[in-house]
Image (spheres, rainbow, N blue to C red):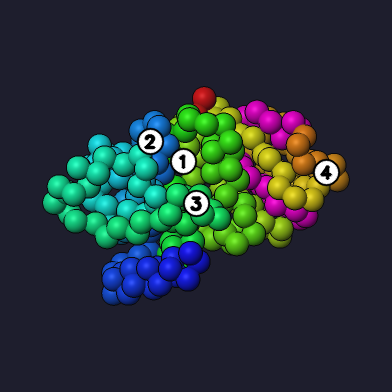
């Protein structure tokens, strides 16, 4: 199964070698329609299964459909005027359709990867999809996930990220792996480097932007979730 996936990936990668892949959007196939994020428009669009239907509803032209195709509108796919490439995956596999799409996107080495999801659906799918951006295989990739009304990104050890969001927006910081040590600025309750945020702790939950916000991580990794107030 892995060999077949690699072969299909190789064939489809060759189709995009001469394309502009600097900004890739991955439209997830959850039950709810995502919204168009406030960021540069994509040079390449990957649709995860039913994400093709969502992309069509958002007037996005899909370049590649990837997944086991168990929830997509197959009639609409066959009749699509854009004729996207299709990478059909088996139902029994070692990773989710979204992770396969993320693997594919990472090989193209884009400058930006934006994941679009409407949220909702099964809790286990939603949690794993949110945590994927902190997977060690993708932690250093320029990924932002837009899930319903929230925006997610990771911050690695030694990294500083500005949080360029409107005043009043909510910020939550989730520890990934070992105890997180970080320092924030511009939040109502700033975190300091001398007090760790342990995995599973609610200490980083539901903060608020009150100024020029940023986070500096000295140990561990974090997922930052920004939600419109």
Q: Residues within 10 Å of mark 3 (few under 14, many from 20)?
A: few
Disc 4/disc 3 C-alpha distance (Å)? 40 Å
Q: Which residue was labeled with disc 1?
A: 146
Verify whether residue 205 appears in magenta.
Answer: yes
Q: Which residue was labeled with disc 2?
A: 34
Q: Are marks 1 and 2 in contact (CB under 8 Å)?
A: yes
Q: Residues within 10 Å of mark 1 (few under 14, many from 20)?
A: many
At x 17%, y 54%, the residue is: 82
At x 15%, y 47%, the residue is: 79
At x 35%, y 65%, the residue is: 21
Disc 1/disc 2 C-alpha distance (Å)? 8 Å
Dot 3 falls on a residue whose secondary structure is: loop
- Does residue 32 lie above or below 81 as drawn? above
Q: Are marks 4 and 3 in contact (CB under 8 Å)?
A: no
Which labelled disc corresponds to residue 196?
Answer: 4
Q: Which residues are magenta?
A: 202-226
Q: Residues within 10 Å of mark 2 (few under 14, many from 20)?
A: many
Which labelled disc corresponds to residue 92?
Answer: 3
Dot 4 falls on a residue whose secondary structure is: loop
Q: Earlier in the sequence, mark 4 or mark 2?
A: 2
Q: Position of residue 54 (x, y in %)?
A: 31, 39
């Amino acid at each position: 199964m892995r060999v077949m996936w690699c072969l299909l990936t190789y064939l489809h990668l060759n189709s995009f070698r001469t394309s502009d892949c600097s900004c890739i959007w991955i439209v997830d196939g959850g039950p709810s329609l995502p919204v168009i994020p406030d960021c540069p428009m994509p040079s390449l669009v990957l649709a995860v299964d039913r994400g093709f239907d969502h992309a069509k509803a958002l007037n996005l032209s899909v370049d590649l459909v990837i997944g086991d195709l168990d929830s997509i509108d197959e009639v609409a796919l066959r009749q699509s005027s854009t004729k996207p490439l299709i990478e059909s995956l088996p139902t029994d596999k070692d990773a989710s359709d979204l992770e396969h799409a993320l693997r594919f996107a990472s090989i193209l080495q884009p400058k930006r990867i934006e994941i679009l999801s409407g949220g909702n659906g099964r809790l286990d799918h939603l949690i794993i999809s949110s945590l994927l951006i902190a997977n060690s295989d993708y932690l250093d990739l320029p990924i932002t996930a837009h899930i319903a009304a929230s925006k997610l990104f990771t911050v690695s050890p030694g990294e500083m990220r500005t949080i360029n969001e409107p005043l009043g927006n909510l910020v939550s910081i989730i520890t990934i792996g070992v105890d997180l040590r970080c320092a924030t600025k511009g939040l109502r309750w700033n975190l300091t480097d001398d007090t760790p945020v342990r995995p599973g702790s609610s200490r980083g939950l539901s903060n608020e932007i009150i100024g020029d916000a940023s986070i500096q991580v000295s140990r561990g990794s974090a997922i930052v979730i920004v939600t419109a107030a």
